[in-house]
Image (cartoon, coloured by chain):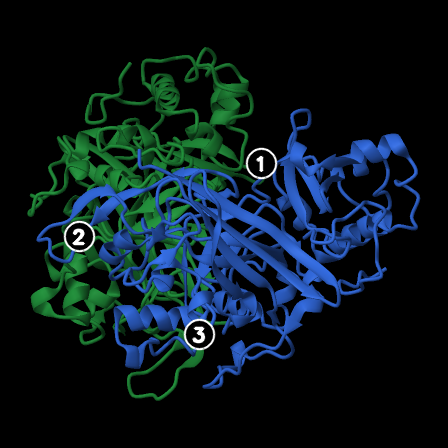
Chain colours: A green, B blue
Amino acid sequence: MQIKANDSSLKSWVEVPADSDFPIQNLPFGIFKTEYLNAGAGVAIGDYVLDLTYLYENGFLDGLGLPAGVFNQHTLNGFIGLGKQKTRAVRERISELLLDDNDELRDRKAARELALIPMEEVEMLMPVHVPNYTDFYSSEEHARNVGTMFRDPDNALMPNWKHLPVGYHGRASSIVVSGTPFHRPKGQTKANDADTPSYGPCRLLDFELEMAFITCKENGLGNPVSTQEAEDYIFGFVLFNDWSARDIQKWEYVPLGPFLAKNFASHSSPWIVTMDALEAFRVKGPEQDPAVLPYLKYEGKKNFDINLEVGIQPDGSEETVVCNSSFKYMYWNVNQQLAHHTGNGCNLQVGDMYASGTISGPTPDSYGSMLELSWQGTKTIAMKDGTERKFIQDGDTVVMRGFAERDGVRVGFGEVNAKVLPAK
Amino acid sequence: MQIKANDSSLKSWVEVPADSDFPIQNLPFGIFKTEYLNAGAGVAIGDYVLDLTYLYENGFLDGLGLPAGVFNQHTLNGFIGLGKQKTRAVRERISELLLDDNDELRDRKAARELALIPMEEVEMLMPVHVPNYTDFYSSEEHARNVGTMFRDPDNALMPNWKHLPVGYHGRASSIVVSGTPFHRPKGQTKANDADTPSYGPCRLLDFELEMAFITCKENGLGNPVSTQEAEDYIFGFVLFNDWSARDIQKWEYVPLGPFLAKNFASHSSPWIVTMDALEAFRVKGPEQDPAVLPYLKYEGKKNFDINLEVGIQPDGSEETVVCNSSFKYMYWNVNQQLAHHTGNGCNLQVGDMYASGTISGPTPDSYGSMLELSWQGTKTIAMKDGTERKFIQDGDTVVMRGFAERDGVRVGFGEVNAKVLPAK
């Protein structure tokens, strides 16, 4: 059975609130633990987590040829590394089990209560171990805004920008799951009017609204992956906050790129929404002019219409939404990113994260960073509690949310949030 | 017993040729396999590999509190992650076992023959799994040469260069062990006189002579490591060839740094020479002027006098040494690199590789890349076979060697070599 993500007639016997990110059309994968259960794989359905270890051990996933213990793990790497044919079959079987007319689990009360765990009782962990992390720079509006601010409004984009999806390597070790608080980083900065640099707490802490895809297949060193093949390598997507220390970045980044300005923490949402679940939300990407080189050409709808928002919640106060953007604005799509990344033979590994770069839209309220929203600190953003922001303050929690919606079906990502603690 | 690395009176009952990199004063760790043995940990002594799994399983390492199976692994991560106190005790015990007056292994012929495997019978593998890879840019001569060529001879160093050890994240997945051939990468480049870029085999393939240190301890996200503490985190060093595609680099690297120009392959030497083995070869680093910020200050001798050379061996022909350099030339030392890297709370993992950046000396024959040796292709380097090089050609094998020598004791790294195959 092929799940139709936009088929609103599909219903689950699990109650799913109308505004839930996790209807039966979604079924994202994550790693959870509870007071009583070790870390293991689960699927989100409504306000519950479906325990895949329990399903496997009690025969509900028989016949799919799954290796023993594949769900009873601290990461999804083993599972997603089985390949999309197998993971798709698992998702389709879960969909079948949860459909309102299926009684296999529904009518076995004890099994049902063990398999479905209320979300408020679980702690979500990083869904994958990340062997490699790359950050692209694929939103034209973001690149133009940054180029306008720091260089030349008339030549905001670098000459290479429309010819290749610019990217750079980031730090894998400091990617943590939503909800992990962190301390404001210290670092070396140099004020414009200072003769020498100094070391101390970052003053211009910023978020970057991003999405990231996670790979599930190895190509092997030396083997490029074409835009046509790329989707075999992509398991799904998460929301991603690529925290940035703008004052550290400004001083350190020449000539080899961002380093300590980025590697103190990046946050991932806990649920990986599969590429399959996003099929119904594909849209055409922007016209690419000039034409791209043959290895970057692609056919079909490769962008995804995913609504994105960013909120800032001051400590003990109400959240203010400061940005509404969409993943559909990307100039370079994920097929092109992967084809470019492997065009030199670079090898992908299972669990790698490839982030989009800041996703800014065309209007000022759709910019995906405080750098752009406050236009380098020349404007202030009003908070509902009466305070103002140019950058992120200690005690602020930054929350990013994302969902796609069409024909009455909403497929969402939940959220990625993180609270900024004062510098140590 | 503390091993004195420069004590030339120490002799092993294992015969060690006079010019060997691996006398009893060295005892580097690596991962090897043979036709009959699965991958496992070994120590180099003369022309032999000492099988640590065999020693452990036969009681020679009893009393050291080592976990079962720690050597019977595909990587050294588990072993080095035990911490320096434990790994130092293992190395000292091995030294004791190999000393000429120790009969424990020496006089047990069967055990000796099983424990010592001739090097020509082993295949060396990557010594560690590399969770994170960072490349620094810490040789002043290299940074000056590049700045002079590409920017302004009068302002060759960027303003930040003498205030912090510039570095950037590299790709961990494509780090492979010495001896692994690879295909010339393809990529997007743009000729100076072309209107548009093209995609094809790299034309300006280059090596970079580097060394890398490998970490053995976690600091945990948010916890800076001081220059004083840094050495607790460093297990040892390898030779490192950070292959670079100069034409790809030139077009792609603005504004976020090198990416596909570097991530198609990097080669590590197979033996990790411990920091302990290098104690006798410490030298003072260069005077740092201007004075560094307090978090980068250090005391004592933190540079290492390690002779380095690079040879090019054309296909089926004789090798020509094209570069003689030394690790002692580094402006920024490893203590400073680690303190800077963690100054924002970035978390280290066991097995991480931190490469020095190209190690160039003050004279033209000590430059650590073809970019500098051929001065951007304006000069040719003569090969012994009558051919010439500006950059690396298909069929060339690039070989890097390194050793320290003092008071009649030579502690070496062996070599890192790799052959360049034609583009696919």
Q: CA distance from mark 1 to mark 2?
A: 53 Å
- Say which amino acid is labelled 1: Asn
The residue under the point 45% across, 72% down is: B363
Callout 2 secondary element: loop
Residue A141, percent from left and from top? 14, 57
Where residue B136 appears, as percent x and y from the top left, is: 45, 63
Q: Say if mark 2 contacts mark 3, CB within 8 Å.
A: no
**The N terminus of chain B lies in which quarter of the figure?**
bottom right
- Identified at 42% across, 37% down, the residue is A349
Gap between marks 2 and 3, in whole Å?
32 Å
Q: Nearer the viewer, mark 1 or mark 2?
A: 2
Q: Are marks 1 and 2 in contact (CB under 8 Å)?
A: no
Q: Looking at this view, is A122 or B87 the one in front?
A: B87
Q: How many marks?
A: 3
Instruction: Measure how far apart labels 3 and 1 are at the Cα level.
Output: 43 Å
Q: In this orientation, does residue A415 appear?
A: yes
Q: Is residue A326 above or below residue B231?
A: above
Which residue in the protein does label 1 denote?
Answer: A38
Residue A95: image location, x then y, percent = 34, 21
Seen in the image, is B32 located left or right of residue A66? right
Query: Looking at the image, is A320 positioned above or below residue B21?
Result: below
Callouts 2 and 3 on one subunit: yes
Could you tell me which chain the residue with mark 2 belongs to?
A: B
> How many residues crowd around disc 2 within 10 Å: few (fewer than 14), some, or many (20 or more)?
some
Q: Which mark is residue B164?
A: 3
Question: Is disc 2 on the same chain as disc 1?
Answer: no
Instruction: Tell me which residue sits at (47%, 70%) in the image.
Output: B361
Specify the subunit that label 3 lies on.
B
User: What amino acid type is highlighted by mark number 2?
Assistant: Lys
User: Relative to the observer, which residue lies in front, B222 or B21?
Assistant: B21
Q: Is residue A109 left or right of residue A367?
A: right
Task: List the residue tagged with mark 2.
Answer: B190
